Amino acid sequence: MQTVMAFVVGALYAAGLYLMMRRSIFKLIIGLALLSHGSNLFLFLMGYLTRGGPPITPPEAVRPVAPFADPLPQALILTAIVIGFGVQAFAVVLIRRAHETLGTDDLDKMQSTDVD
Amino acid sequence: MTSLILSTATTYLLPLLLLLSVYLLLHGHDVPGGGFVGGVVAAAAFALYAIAHGVEEARRVLHTHPRTLIGLGLLTALLSGVIAFVSNEPFLKGLWTTVTLPVEWKLGTPTLFDVGVYLVVVGVTLMIIFSVAED
Amino acid sequence: MKVLLLLPLLIPLLTAIISLLVWDRRLQRIFGVIGMAGLLGSAVGLLRTVCKEGIQAVQVGGWPAPFGITLVADVFAAIMVVMAGLMGLAVMVYSLTSMDKRRESFGYYPLTHIMLMGVCGSFLTGDIFNLYVWFEVMLIASFVLTELGSEKAQLEGAIKYVTLNLVSSALFLTAVGVLYGMVGTLNMADLANQLAKVKPSGLVTTASMLFFLAFGIKAAVFPLFFWLPASYHTPPVSVSAIFAALLTKVGVYALIRVFSLLFTGQTAATHGLILAVAGLTMATGVLGAVAQNDFRRLLSFHIVSQIGYMIMGLGLFTPLGLAGSIFHIVHNMLAKTNLFLISGVVHRVKGTYQLSSLGGLSRSSPGLAILFLVSAFSLAGMPPLSGFWSKLILVQAGLQAREYTIVAVALVVSLLTLYSMTKIWNEVFWKTDPAEGEQEPAKTDSFGEAESSLALLAPIVVIGCLIVSIGLAAQPVFALFEKAAHQLMNPAEYIRAVLGELP
């Protein structure tokens, strides 16, 4: 499973980067979303996969029954997902405004700030 | 877009969804739920209302500007941290007390923090949805 | 005094909350200035405490380190928080008259406070994932600030800025994942302990390079800086100024923190790379600047160039080098912010940033010309201003470490900086105004002219005085930076402050 997930992470990164290289601003945002999903999944995998062992301590016990899943990466990606949600919502509004104001979705036509 | 079915349904769905969101908010400490999920459900309820009745109407039903909700939410979250601080505990430490309503209910500063998260999420989400819908 | 560690975070938050709730421009301005002054005051208090009583740490929520989130302030972090407060206050006073009503009503003030909170949080946190969260707080606020007003150029700049920073965040998160998978902790002090036990392996190097890429994009170092000159000149000048003062410096801070605390096992490879990148950053930045013909774009390229000096000290990795880096960060925050603020005044008087259509300001406003000269000469490193001492220390550190190439690059770049500063001087202040005789552009603001120029010039004058006084009283200031560098080079004290006495 770990190996399969590793390939999934790789595919997400590759797809994200590929889409970011395209000229369409819309694909850029999709690419960014995939990239951040890729890193979220990667972070999740770093706690290693444990099936059917929630990290919940039974009453009158000191620690959960082994084997239990590492709860920390889950908490981390939850935070990262929430942040990603906010940033992507902003990015969608931004490209919408940009598309309306600039009248194009072609990144190659957005070079006026790179030259005098 | 005006649909009689949708607009009639949302009139009844809005209070139900808001109730569900409060349920999720209060149950969030040890079962799935919490401030974020509750806030998203509440925001979705208002978004649905905006789809059915228009953004103006949804703003009117909300009674207040989304940014006020953000401010209130941040204030609540800040308060939950300061309560622990003024009672000589580390900042943001969870303090718990049991309230005996008809049912016994554990109330604590993390609940208050969750309420803050709920308000901020509703505020931010609605701010984005309204501004996109109004453009 | 644990509360002092929390105040730099709580004051901006509270000010932002008040600005959100009252939503009245006049009150937001008043609270904005009060809030920034409060931030500066608490930061100075923190610095004094840290100097007197050593490194301070707070376990937020009462969860003991390394399990909870720790806030830590060593001398370096405290200095940075003081600078953030100072720059925040200066820019806030400046924006009282320079910010237009429309942007104010879209939430300029609360966003600035939230950004300041993110900046201070990044300086004070002792947890690597928490650092990511503070980065995002700062970035989201800065995204909205770049885009605020939705002008054409702003939107274009914002797309580049947002994209590159999101990529950097994804890399940062991946790097955190690698570290966590390797040693199973996120507390920076604990990480330092655990990483010292791990045998140098490809994985450690991978993690360190991912961090270098992530922070390098934010700090705008050599191959990763292209977003900066493409976006920093598009928003209003007070936004440009606060970005120039703080955001890239947060990246530099994170680089210094991570490469002095965590990745010190293979200094020959990692710090050698940093040194090479430092040289390239200086050179490319200044060469880019020489070719520019827009006041603010020229200054944006100089930000890049000066970042090179800041990480040069890190690359040398000697106490003197790090002290030079910190000195240069402080000096550059002052000088660069001041130059941006001056460019805003020039724009206000003449209505343009194009060097070719400016001129004659040395006769019409000699005071401004002197203020510009102070900052510009300081940036170029003329004695006795602050920039001279920071570059002198860096060069001395380079000579001690026998890194003659980087010293040569630093000196040549200094000359080129002087050249491009004199170019601004010639074009903006010295040559005759090409539009002489034509009508002055109309000025629109809500305040009277006298008040407006006072609020605009007061921050510039104060920062100018600071630049001169740091230059004249370099010794006591340098002693402070040396102390900060000493703490960075000996992380044992930092680790002890966070984790307590280890068995």
Image (cartoon, rainbow, N blue to C red):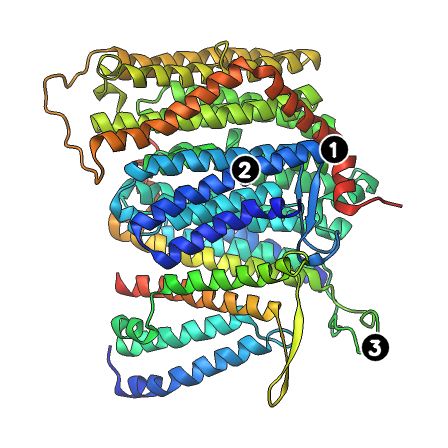
User: What is the number of the mark on residue C49?
Assistant: none
Residue at the limit of the structure toward the front, as seen here: B87
- Spatial CA distance of label 1 from label 3 is 44 Å
- Protein chain holding label 1: C
**Residue identifier under label 3:** A60
Instruction: Name which residue type carries label 2.
Output: Val
**Residue identifier under label 1:** C264
**Residue identifier under label 2:** C250
Regarding mark 2 in the picture, which secondary structure is present there? helix
- Residue C259 is drawn in which quadrant? top right
Instruction: Name which residue type carries label 1.
Output: Thr
Q: Is residue C320 left or right of residue C91?
A: right
Regarding mark 3 in the picture, which secondary structure is present there? loop
x and y percentages locating residue C335 in the rendered image: 45, 23
- Protein chain holding label 2: C
- Spatial CA distance of label 2 from label 1 is 20 Å
Compared with C424, A1 (above or below) is below
Instruction: Name which residue type carries label 3.
Output: Glu
- Please rate how many residues cluster around mark 1, counting C-alpha atoms within 10 Å: few if below 14, some from 14 to 19, many from 20: some
Please tell me which residue is depicted at 62% across the width and 48% down the height of the picture: C3
